Amino acid sequence: MVRTRIEDMRTPEAETPVRPCDHPGCSAAGAYRAPRSRAALNMFHWFCIDHVRAYNTAWNYYAGMSAAEIEREIRNDTVWQRPTWPMGVRGGIGYRPRFRDFGLFEDGETEERRAAPKRQHLSPQEQALTVFNLAPPLTLVALKARYKELVKLNHPDAHGGDKAAEERLKIINLAYSTLKASYFP
């Protein structure tokens, strides 16, 4: 019985060829890859450890780009190079707001407000009930449901960051905390 060692069975073709370093004049093995350019990130130079360190130190992805191009590239990277659309765009045929504010959030006077009898002073609870368009007796379930509905309709993110929507949401939050503290201590 002839026993052969594994080393004897190896052929020279089976050995992995050593790639030389791409740096001119270097004879070391090129074991580390580095991208060739910003435009060719899938094509690589192969360097030894010393030359890949020098290459990485000098590498600047944004070299040759203007400030506007750099900003656009960074913004594009924040969404993983995918298109985005503004949130809360509610327009088009047949759209009408589902929230009726009864003139509380309007800047100017409307005819309804001028024709309505003037009430002197409303308590904070009455003002909050008016914002929520609710009347006593009030349940916690009804209050929370109406609050969620108003927040969804008036959240600034749903209106593209509108400052008026932000102010409406502040009024709704204040009214909610007032009603919750008054009726459900």
Image: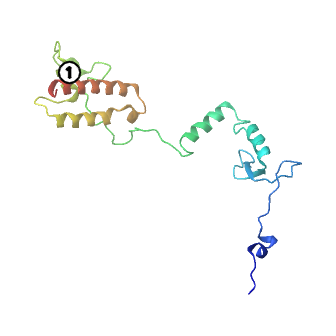
Look at the image and name its color scheme.
Answer: rainbow
Is residue 1 rendered to the left or right of residue 167? right
Residue 84 in the image: x percent, y percent? 50, 42
At label 1, which amino acid type do we have? Gln
Asked whether residue 102 is in view, the answer is no
Is 162 on the left or on the right of 124, as rendered? right
**What's the residue at 55%, 45% (across, down)?**
80
Element carrying mark 1: helix
Depth order, front residue of 7/81: 7
Could you classify mark 1 by the number of other residues whose Cα lies within 10 Å: few (under 14), some (14-19), or many (20 or more)? Answer: some
Give 139 or 15, whichever is nearer the viewer: 15
Q: Residue at x 41, y 28 (%)?
A: 162
Image coordinates of residue 118 in percent, x first then y, are 17, 15
Where does label 1 land, which residue? 127
When asked about the image quadrant of residue 94, the answer is: top left
Residue at image location 15% in from the left, 27% down from the top: 183
**Can you give x and y, in whole percent of width and height, for residue 111 in the image?**
24, 21
> Dividing the image into 4 quarters, which one contains the N terminus?
bottom right
